[in-house]
């Protein structure tokens, strides 16, 4: 059960093309995926809710993302939640929660 601590699994579609950067001698990819939930409200109307998730991929996974992923691609990921803060240009402190991806599975054909 200890491997379930801080574990996230999602299947979704990319909202943007991966943003690839090199940090030192490592590659990092930033991207976001959308997941959808469908349900019916009390009036029987079908409701679809979309959640957006920010992902960070390092090294091999970043190389795969750069080579094979683009906006609209469907992927499955497993990773862990990571929170951080930073100060923006106007001096306000901002908080970000991201998923650091350990495993990546491509579900769409390129």
Image (tube, helix red, strand yellow):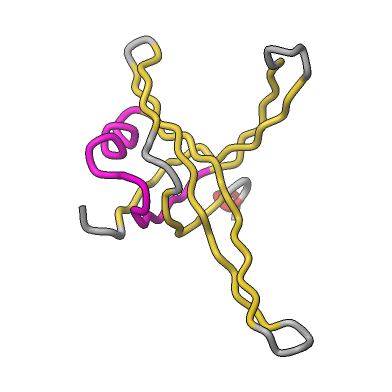
Residue for point 34% across, 33% down: 62
> Measured from the top left, where is residue 110 in percent x and y?
21, 52
> Measured from the top left, where is residue 15 in percent x and y?
45, 48
* Residue 61 relative to residue 43: left or right: left
67 is within the stretch colored magenta: yes
74 is within the stretch colored magenta: yes
Quadrant housing the N terminus: bottom right
* Residue 109 relative to residue 94: left or right: left
> Measured from the top left, where is residue 61 in percent x and y?
33, 37
> Which residue appears farthest toward the bottom when viewing the image?
44
> Measured from the top left, where is residue 101 in percent x and y?
45, 41
Quarter occupied by residue 54: top right
Q: Is residue 99 above or below residue 74?
A: above
Quarter occupied by residue 92: top right
Residue for point 57% across, 50% down: 52
Quarter occupied by residue 20: top left
Residue for point 40% across, 14% down: 23
**How many marks do you count on the picture?**
0
The magenta region covers 59-79
Q: Is residue 42 above or below residue 9?
A: below
Which is more toward the observer, 56 or 40?
A: 40
Which is more toward the observer, 2 or 92?
A: 92
Q: Is residue 73 above or below residue 80?
A: below
Residue for point 50% across, 57% down: 10
């Amino acid at each position: 059960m200890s491997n379930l601590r801080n574990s996230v699994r999602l299947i979704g579609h990319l909202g943007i093309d991966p943003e690839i950067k090199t940090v030192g001698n490592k590659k990092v990819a930033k991207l976001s995926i959308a997941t959808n939930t469908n349900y019916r409200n009390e009036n029987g109307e079908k409701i679809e809710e979309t959640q957006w998730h920010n992902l960070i991929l390092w090294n091999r996974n970043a190389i795969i993302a750069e080579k094979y992923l683009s906006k609209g691609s469907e992927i499955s990921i497993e990773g862990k939640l990571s929170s951080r803060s930073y100060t923006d240009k106007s001096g306000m402190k901002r908080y970000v929660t991201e998923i650091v991806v350990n495993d990546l599975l491509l579900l769409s054909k390129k």
